[in-house]
Amino acid sequence: MTAYRSILFAAALMTLGVPTAQAAEFPAKPASVVFICEHGVSKSLVAAMLFNRIAEQRGLAVRAVSRAVGPQTLASKVPVKLVQNMDDDGFPVKNFRPQAVTTTDADSATRVVVIGYDGTIDAIGSAAAEHWDDVPPASLEYEDAKRKITSHIDKLLQELGGQ
């Protein structure tokens, strides 16, 4: 990471209340979050899109990706109603295709968040994952799902700033 980007990252941490001395201890690598849901085209997709928008608006050097539980779900497409809702919010996802989570994804992530899935995910290995099990189906209850996910994202961004 360039010195300029390191300064921006430290500045972003300070806006979250992290003192300058602590900010200097952070690694130069930007934080990353992997959101996982069963098919990778609904809850995790909404979470990744919202997370990236909110982080960018706050000037934070963090990024998120959406992943599916496994390769058997990769034929999934974003549900039509969800495509419309997300498009209305400025997220063009019509041609989005899911990717299965990999061990590399999990190992390199600052955080792994599993949304609405209680099964075993082999690819996350020993990575510590937090679970957001209170998110309604985004394809059916988009506004409620978005509201719940945004609340979780706010807390997550505060925690990432305090690590």
Image: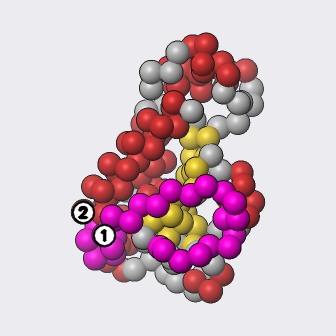
The answer to the question of whether label 1 and label 2 lie on touching residues, with beta carbons closer than 8 A, is: yes
Q: In which quarter of the image is residue 141?
A: bottom left
Q: Residue 136 carries which label?
A: 1
Q: Residues within 10 Å of mark 2 (few under 14, many from 20)?
A: some
Report the side of 68 relative to 82 (left or right). right
Residue at the spot 52% in from the left edge and 15% down from the top edge: 19
Location of residue 68 with respect to 74 vertically, above or below:
above
Mark 1–mark 2 Cα distance, whole angstroms, equals 7 Å
Residue at the spot 48% in from the left edge and 74% down from the top edge: 118
Magenta: main secondary structure equals loop
| Range shown magenta | 117-142
Location of residue 76 with respect to 40 vertically, above or below:
below
Magenta segment includes 133: yes
Report the side of 126 relative to 148 (left or right). right
Q: How crowded is mark 1: few (under 14 residues within 10 Å), some or many (20 or more)?
A: some
Residue 27 x, y percent position in the rendering: 71, 30
Q: Quadrant of residue 123?
A: bottom right
Of callouts 1 and 2, the N-terminal one: 1
Location of residue 103 with respect to 80 vertically, above or below:
above
Where does label 2 land, which residue? 144
Residue 24 x, y percent position in the rendering: 66, 18
Quarter of the image with the N terminus in it: top right
Q: Quadrant of residue 5?
A: top right
Asked which secondary structure carries label 2, the reply is: helix
